[in-house]
Amino acid sequence: MPAAELRQEHIQFQSNLYESNNPTRRWLHNARRDWVLKTLEQIPVTSPLYLEIGIGCGIYTQLMAKRGNVIAVDINPAFVDLANQMRNVVAHVADITTTSLAPIHDVAVCSEVLEHVPDSRSSLKNIYSSLKPGGYLVLTTPNSYSTMELTARLLAFGPVVKLAKLVYGEPVDDLGHINRMTRQQLQDQIHASGFEVIRQDNVAFYLPLIAEFGGHCGASICQWLAKRLERSPLSSLLWTQCWLLRRPLV
C-alpha cells in the first residue's frame, strides 16, 4: 500500500510513528514507549500472565512475550493476526468496553486506547476484573488539553491533514480521539474502578512549528521544555499521562 494511503488502522502506519523522519514526532511516540517498557521491567512479577488491551503494531506484545505469556485483545483483526504469529501470545478480536475476562492476569497494559473508546469507565472496570488481587495496570492516554491534543483537533479537517502530510513527508491521519480526558477526569474513573495509584507521570511536549520545522534542534527544545514541565503545575501541557495502577490485595 502506498505510504500516502496508510491510516491509523494499518500496522505499517503504527510502526512508522516510532521511526518517523521528523525528530520531534519520533521522540513524542518513543517517549511514551520508553515509559511503558521501563515500567513493565520494574514490576516485581515473575513469569507473569499479561493482558494487552490494544495491540497496535505489537511493540509491547513482543517484550511481554519474552518475559511471560500474553493474552491480547483488539477490535482490529489485522492487529490480532499479527499478535497470533508471536510465540507465547494468544490474541482475540474483542471490545474491552463490553468484554469481561477472568481474574487471572498479573499485569495489564492499556496504552493509547481509552481515548478511542466511548466508555472508558466500563473499560477500566473490565480491566480491573481481569486482574488478580495485587495485579498491575500500565495505562497511558493523552492529556486532553496538552499542546499536542489541542493542535491535533485540527486533523479532523481534511485540508489540514493534507497540509500535514506535505510538511512531514509521511503518512498523517486524524488521531481518532473521541474520549480525551483531563488527569482529574481519568483519576476519578480510576478510583471508581477500584484501582490504587502507584505512580503517575506525564511525558512528551509538543511545540507547534518548532516541531515541524526545527529538525533535531527543535526536538531538543521540546525535550528540554518537557523536563521542566514534568513536575510543574503546567504538566498537563505534556502530551501523555502515564499511570501505574494496582488492584488492591483485599
Image (cartoon, rainbow, N blue to C red):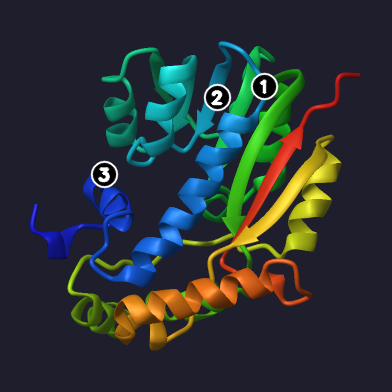
Q: Earlier in the sequence, mark 3 or mark 2?
A: 3
- Residue at coordinates 36% horizontally, 81% vertically from top-left? 217
- Please state which of residues 129 and 221 is positioned toward the viewer in this rendering: 221
Q: CA distance from mark 1 to mark 3?
A: 27 Å
- Please state which of residues 85 and 10 is positioned toward the viewer in this rendering: 85
Q: Secondary structure at mark 3?
A: helix
Q: Tell me if label 3 and label 2 are in contact, CB under 8 Å.
A: no
- Disc nearest the viewer among 2 and 1: 2
Q: Amino acid at mark 2?
A: Leu
Q: Earlier in the sequence, mark 1 or mark 3?
A: 3
- Residue at coordinates 28% horizontally, 71% vertically from top-left? 22
In the rendered image, residue 78, in percent from the top left (x then y), is placed at 27, 35
The disc at residue 11 is 3
Circle 2 crowding by C-alpha within 10 Å: few under 14, some 14–19, many from 20: many
In the rendered image, residue 25, in percent from the top left (x then y), is placed at 36, 68
Q: Tell me if label 2 and label 1 are in contact, CB under 8 Å.
A: yes
Q: Amino acid at mark 3?
A: Ile
Quadrant of the rendering where the C terminus is positioned: top right
Instruction: Answer with left or right where residue 92 lies relative to residue 177.
Output: left
- Residue at coordinates 9% horizontally, 52% vertically from top-left? 1
- Residue at coordinates 58% horizontally, 71% vertically from top-left? 226
Quarter of the image where one finds residue 213:
bottom left
Q: CA distance from mark 2 to mark 1?
A: 8 Å
- Please state which of residues 168 and 41 is positioned toward the viewer in this rendering: 41
Q: Is residue 132 visible?
A: yes
Q: Which residue is mark 2?
A: 51
Quarter of the image where one finds residue 165:
bottom left
In the rendered image, residue 74, in percent from the top left (x then y), is placed at 43, 34
Q: Secondary structure at mark 2?
A: strand
